[in-house]
Image (cartoon, rainbow, N blue to C red):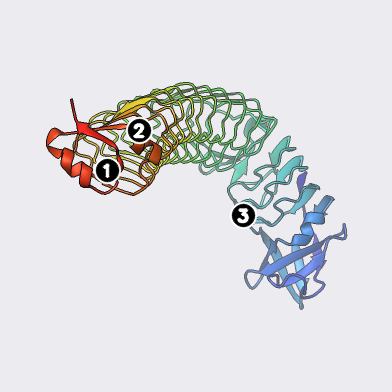
Amino acid sequence: MVSCSGCTEYVADGAPSDNPEASFKVTSPEGIPLYFTITSVSGCSVVGSSTYKNISGQVTLPSRVDYKDVQYRVNNIDKYAFSGCLQLQEVILPEGLVEIERSAFSGCTQLQRVVIPSSLEVLGGSAFDGCTALTSLSVAKGNKNFDSRGDCNAIIDCRSNVLLVGCQTSRIPEGVSGIGEGAFGGCTGLKKVEVPAGVRSIGVSAFGGCSSLEEVVLPKSLHSVGPFAFANCTMLREVALPDAVDHVRDYTFAGCKALEHVRLPDSLQCIEHHAFYGCKSLRNVTLPASLTELGGSAFYECSGLTKVEVPARVTRLGEYAFCFCSGLKEVILHEGLVSIGNGAFSGCSSLTELNVPGSVTRVGDYAFLDCGALTKLDLPAHVVSIGETAFDNCQKLNSLYLRATTPPSTWFESFASVVCSRASLYVPKESVSAYRSAKTWRLFRHIQAMP
């Protein structure tokens, strides 16, 4: 529980020898040493200490501290100050407190209740992220900056109308414009979220680690979903992104291993790095024609995917974009694609053949490494380079069509020796002799003119 109190005054014990970053320490009524740094001529901040990990039960923070005949107001709690205090059950916050910095109480898994004092002006992102036992959130009367309107059991910034802290029993009220960074982070008891109309943004890690979340309903008003917003929501099975969302940010749905269906808006422009990393149950996904960027590891280890079509506006396939998509059997690539990134299809062990569009000029390192079922590959005339071990361990590759009249630059190990000894390499008739004398290509035993 985090409560607030009136004026409490402690006298400093002196400069602490066990925490050199602190200016002085005091002992709370519960016998807990608290550490402070001086931040101004009359103000100080509560700072973290490894000794806090031993706190069990309640701790009362003072509103004022006397040190060397000077009285300091406690107006700040430093970032990560009480982070990871697993046995901390209640904190009494003083009136006069102005700021709680980011992640100040993150991971305090036994905290049950938070009362924000009337003096608080700044509440940092993820301040109570991972406080899984939280069931009660409120703001003291008289606070002009925050409220818990309509007994919503959440903390809302009145100035921006952004919900900053929620818990498993919170209700997102009408009129809220956004869900803040880490607002519901680690709420392991949260099962369903209905975001009301009018909400335009969901912040970084807003619902990250909500491991029991099964259903989320997003409004048409939503424009932005931040990185890690739903990361590691391991029970989430389906999500539909509204039409106004044009980016899926880094790690937005990473680790959502039960996610089977995702609806992407027709206006989507970019899927960023690791957006669907480890979504092992994702069966199919329709990438809209509007998509222009597919980031690195975007669908890394989505082992349930069986088919994917990369839209024509995507010119560069990100590194490891479909790496370890072991169930992927069909890939459709379009003219306009220029580069297949490093490891893009590495470990796609069910992929049997692939037609690479004529616009491709580069096949990156490890691009098709360990594609053990690949039997046929057709590379276009504009390919100028093939990266290191690009086709290594493609044990079943028996037909390789290479349409470039000039042998592309390669690494010695671009192809496994077993491929070179068994596969037929088909090249333009006029280039057969060039391939037979070129580095790496001359290792192929069966080089012949394209039929």
Front residue of 60/433: it is 433
Identify residue for label 2.
Answer: 422
The residue at the point 61 percent across, 30 percent down is 234
Picture quadrant where residue 76 is located = bottom right
Crowding near the residue tagged with mark 3, few <14, some 14–19, many ≥20 C-alpha atoms within 10 Å? some
C-alpha distance separating marks 3 and 1: 60 Å
Q: Is residue 114 left or right of residue 162?
A: right
Q: Residue 86, percent across and down?
A: 77, 47
Identify residue for label 1.
Answer: 441
- Is the Cβ of the residue at disc 3 closer than 8 Å to that at disc 1? no
Residue 62 seen from this side: no
Disc 2 residue type (three-letter): Arg
- Between disc 1 and disc 2, the foreground one is 2
Q: On residue 101, which mark appears?
A: 3
Front residue of 419/237: it is 419
Q: On residue 206, which mark appears?
A: none
Crowding near the residue tagged with mark 1, few <14, some 14–19, many ≥20 C-alpha atoms within 10 Å? many
Front residue of 386/418: it is 418
Picture quadrant where residue 351 is located = top left
C-alpha distance separating marks 3 and 2: 63 Å
Which residue appears farthest toward the left when viewing the image?
430
- Between disc 3 and disc 1, the foreground one is 1
Q: Is mark 2 on a helix, strand or loop?
A: helix
C-alpha distance separating marks 1 and 2: 13 Å
Q: Which of marks 3 and 2 is nearer the N terminus?
A: 3
- Quarter of the image that includes the N terminus: top right
Disc 1 residue type (three-letter): Trp
Residue 225 seen from this side: yes
